[in-house]
Structure formats: structure tokens, C-alpha cells
């Protein structure tokens, strides 16, 4: 018998990965195993009201917890799936305060970015062992363990490739691609994604490979200083006719662009990287990937087999030189390029929905009958105000922690974290400590 899962969603558009890959592809991929129900609760509106309230927050949370329980009973749900990470600690708090029992399922796309880290810190003490945390890499799993022991039971299962994308790839088998020889970057055009490194590596090869071009695809703002710095570099080095800013690409155009590239360059040093969806899209298209040796990427790319991994813990000039060296290796031998391409396609098969959806379903079923964590012991409550440094959106919750049981429930684990006597958590230092032990572990 299949599982029944209710979807608790906000009215706000979620991120690309969460909204498209999870909401659409997860349901499609698991349709044979899971019966999905859209819960009749305006979660975004309710939880925004809680944050704005100065009084009666406990009553509102109790009401939400009871509503979720009734919806769970109505549809005989095995899990409630939360598609917006901002709701996760509040759902847990509503469940705990209302003393209702229902199991929660969510995905942790990012770990150490300020707002995500904040919500994992709030969620950890209220997590039940029967709740299901899906992370997209073993790297993410290790980071969560470094934050709080309760988060250590997360299951590492990769994201699945879109069936639409795979179908589009098949349609290109007999279609002519662009004759241009080009390297590709695809993603957000921001500094931490390593766009500059790829551009400099390409520039160093431009004279030796006059036919080679670089296409930079992704959304950008013509007034953005980083974009303007790229333009200045291109103009100063006389490669304007060799570099093209493609802009945002989707569907047919995106597939064609990836499939026609000699290689995808993804030299990110962004702390948010926990998987690399564009990397598996490139591999599925038979396009080798040149990426930084970021922990999550090492789980996807095997150096010299389906792409290349560049040490990102070295001097920037050395990094750019190493990128240029592997690009030349690809360009000098069509036979070598063809072998990498074949290996890339083969390695991407484990990201097809048939494989991933089975793994998700099996793990969900296994978690159903596990024991639950005990609720918090009031005698251990520290009663400290949680003050967040370096915070953006998440601070709107911390502003109200002193008013109700948020203070007590979320304060009980602060002694476990690295903070001073006032209970202030320094996110920068916490990230550095976790990353020091996890990010550059030996292979």
C-alpha cells in the first residue's frame, strides 16, 4: 500500500529547486507510491500573523497545531510535507504546544546560509525521530550533524532529473546543434559562483584557440557592479567577440545550450552549495563538468572520469591556471572528450526519477514506525533571549521570542551551541567551525 502525504505550502513562490523539483517532479516521480493532498490551510498568512502578534501567540499556535492534526486525520496522512523552510520550526512549535501528533517531511536544500542555519537551529530541539529530513548529499548530512545531534538522522538522497528535461535530451539526438565551439557557465551571475575564474581561464586560452567561445547563461542586472566588472574585463582584454551573455534560458533553449557545450564550468565557492543541480543536468546531456572541489560536488563528479575537480583551497591565480589546463586537455583530444561524455551520461542515470523516487519512498516507509524524541524538559530551559548576529529575514522571529513560549522552547539548547554568556550566537564563527572539519575532508 502506498503512502499518503499532505502538502503544507505558503502562497509565496518558493525557490526554483524547492518549487519545481520538489512540488512538481517529486509528486510526479512518486505518483505510483504516494497519494498527495493539498492541505486546506493558508500557512503563509497564519504564520505571518503569528510573527506580527504581541499577544495570544500560544493560542494561535495551538489552533494551527490542531488544524494540522485534523487535516492529517481527515486524509489519513502518513506525513505532512512542508515546502517552505521558514515554516518548519513554527510547525514543530505548533505541534508541540498543541500536543498533537503528526509526522513531518521536508527537504534541507541549504544548511549554512544565515537564514537556513537559523531555522535549523530553531527546529532541532523540536524534531521527532519519526520526522523525515531529506538532504541532497552526504556533505549536507555531515553539516547538519555538526549543528545539532537531533539533525543527524537526515537521509542523503540526491535530487532527481526532470522527466521533461530528459525527454528534451532524447529529442535532440537527431537534431543539429550549433557549430560554435564554446564553454558554458549556467547559473546566477554572482561573484561566489566563480564566474570570474572561468572567464579568466578562458581569456588565457583565447589566442591559442581562436574559434573557442564562452557563453555565460543566467539572469543578470546590467546595473549590477559584478556584471559590470565582468564587462570591463572582457573589453580590456579584447575578447568581446568571444564572450556572450545569454541571459536566462529555459526548456528547449537550455537543453540545446548545455548539450552543445564542450564543457560546463561551475567553479562555485558559495557556502550554500549542497548539491549542484545544473551539474547533473550537464552530465545527463553528456557534457563534462569542470567544478571546484567543493564537498558536495565530489559526490557527483569523479575527477578525470566524467569531468574535473579543481582544488578551491588554493591561490586564485593557481586555480585559474588549473582550469585552463583541464580545458586544454578536453580540446586537444576528441577521443578523450568523447570518453568523458559517455561516462557523464552513464553517471547521471542514478539521478533519474525511477531510481531516486524508489529511494525516497523506501526511506519514508522506514521512518514511519520509528520512536519519537521526548519533548523538552522544562527544568533544562535556560530562559535566554536568542539574539541573532548577521541576520536578515530570520530576525523577525527572534524579535518576538521573549513574548511567549518561543523563548522557553527555543532557548533550551543554546548551551549546546557556541555562544557567549548572553546567548548570542555568532553565525560566522559557527559556520567556520563546522566548515573547518567538514568542507575539506580528505577523500
Image: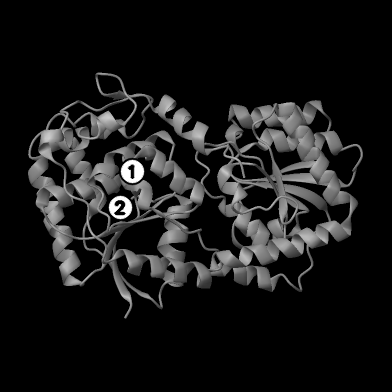
The quarter of the displayed image where residue 49 is located? top left
User: In the drawing, does residue 341 fall left or right of residue 192?
Assistant: right
Is residue 240 visible in the rendered structure shown here?
A: no
Secondary-structure class at tag 1: helix
Which residue appears at 36% of the width and 30% of the height?
A: 392
Q: Position of residue 255 (x, y in %)?
A: 66, 61
Q: Are marks 1 and 2 in contact (CB under 8 Å)?
A: no
State the scheme by which the image is colored.
Answer: one colour
Image quarter where the N terminus lies is bottom left
Is disc 1 surrounded by few (<14), some (14 to 19) or many (20+) residues within 10 Å? few
Could you give the CA–CA distance between mark 1 and mark 2, rounded to whole angstroms? 29 Å
In the image, residue 330 above or below residue 238: below
Q: Earlier in the sequence, mark 1 or mark 2?
A: 2
Q: Which-is-in-front pick, marks 1 and 2?
A: 1
Is residue 321 visible in the rendered structure shown here?
A: yes
Which residue appears at 89% of the width and 47% of the height?
A: 211
Q: Position of residue 6 (x, y in %)?
A: 28, 65
Outermost residue, top side? 421
Q: Which residue is disc 1 drawn over?
A: 149
The quarter of the displayed image where residue 443 is located? top right
User: In the drawing, does residue 331 fall left or right of residue 78?
Assistant: right
Q: Which residue is disc 2 drawn over?
A: 10
Which residue appears at 46% of the width and 65% of the height?
A: 25
Q: Position of residue 186 (x, y in %)?
A: 64, 48
User: In the drawing, does residue 99 fall left or right of residue 387?
Assistant: left
Outermost residue, front side? 442
- Looking at this view, is 18 or 441 the one in front? 441
Amino acid at each position: 500500500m502506498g503512502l499518503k502525504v499532505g502538502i503544507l505550502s505558503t502562497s509565496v513562490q518558493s525557490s526554483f529547486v524547492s518549487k519545481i523539483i520538489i512540488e512538481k517532479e517529486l509528486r510526479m516521480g512518486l505518483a505510483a507510491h504516494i497519494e498527495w493532498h493539498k492541505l486546506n490551510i493558508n500557512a503563509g498568512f497564519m504564520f505571518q500573523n503569528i510573527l506580527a502578534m504581541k499577544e495570544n501567540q500560544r493560542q494561535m499556535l495551538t489552533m494551527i497545531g490542531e488544524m494540522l492534526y485534523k487535516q492529517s486525520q481527515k486524509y489519513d496522512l502518513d506525513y505532512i510535507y512542508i515546502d517552505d523552510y521558514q515554516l518548519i520550526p513554527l510547525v514543530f512549535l505548533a505541534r508541540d504546544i498543541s500536543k498533537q501528533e503528526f509526522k513531518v517531511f521536508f527537504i534541507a536544500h541549504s544548511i549554512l546560509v544565515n537564514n537556513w542555519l537559523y531555522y535549523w537551529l530553531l527546529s532541532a530541539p523540536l524534531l521527532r525521530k519519526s520526522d523525515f529530513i531529506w538532504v541532497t548529499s552526504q556533505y549536507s548530512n555531515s553539516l547538519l550533524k555538526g549543528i545539532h545531534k537531533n539533525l543527524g538522522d537526515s537521509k542523503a538522497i540526491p535530487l532527481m532529473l526532470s522527466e521533461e528535461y530528459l525527454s528534451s535530451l532524447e529529442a535532440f539526438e537527431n537534431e543539429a546543434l550549433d557549430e560554435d565551439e564554446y564553454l558554458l557557465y549556467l547559473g546566477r551571475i554572482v561573484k561566489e559562483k566563480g564566474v570570474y575564474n572561468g572567464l579568466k581561464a578562458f581569456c588565457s586560452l583565447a589566442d591559442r584557440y581562436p574559434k573557442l567561445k564562452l557563453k555565460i547563461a543566467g539572469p543578470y542586472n546590467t546595473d549590477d557592479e559584478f556584471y559590470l566588472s565582468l564587462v570591463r574585463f572582457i573589453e580590456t582584454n579584447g575578447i568581446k567577440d568571444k564572450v556572450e551573455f545569454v541571459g536566462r534560458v529555459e526548456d528547449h533553449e537550455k537543453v540545446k545550450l548545455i548539450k552543445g557545450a564542450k564543457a560546463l564550468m561551475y567553479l562555485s565557492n558559495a557556502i550554500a552549495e549542497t548539491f549542484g543541480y545544473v551539474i547533473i543536468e550537464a552530465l545527463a546531456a553528456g557534457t563534462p563538468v569542470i567544478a571546484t572541489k567543493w564537498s558536495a560536488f565530489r559526490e557527483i563528479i569523479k575527477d578525470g572520469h566524467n569531468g574535473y575537480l579543481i582544488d578551491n583551497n588554493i591561490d586564485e591565480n593557481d586555480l585559474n591556471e588549473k582550469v585552463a589546463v583541464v580545458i586544454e586537455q578536453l580540446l586537444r583530444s576528441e577521443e578523450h572528450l568523447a570518453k568523458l561524455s559517455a561516462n557523464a551520461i552513464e553517471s547521471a542515470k542514478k539521478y533519474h526519477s525511477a531510481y531516486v523516487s524508489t529511494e525516497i519512498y523506501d526511506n519514508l516507509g522506514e521512518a514511519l514506525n520509528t520512536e519519537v524524541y521526548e519533548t523538552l524538559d522544562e527544568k533544562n530551559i535556560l530562559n535566554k533571549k536568542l539574539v541573532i548576529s548577521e541576520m536578515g529575514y530570520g530576525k523577525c522571529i527572534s524579535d518576538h521570542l521573549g513574548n511567549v513560549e518561543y523563548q522557553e522552547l527555543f532557548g533550551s539548547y543554546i548551551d549546546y551551541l557556541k555562544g557567549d554568556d548572553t546567548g548570542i550566537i555568532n553565525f560566522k564563527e559557527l559556520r567556520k567551525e563546522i566548515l573547518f572539519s567538514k568542507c575539506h575532508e580528505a577523500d
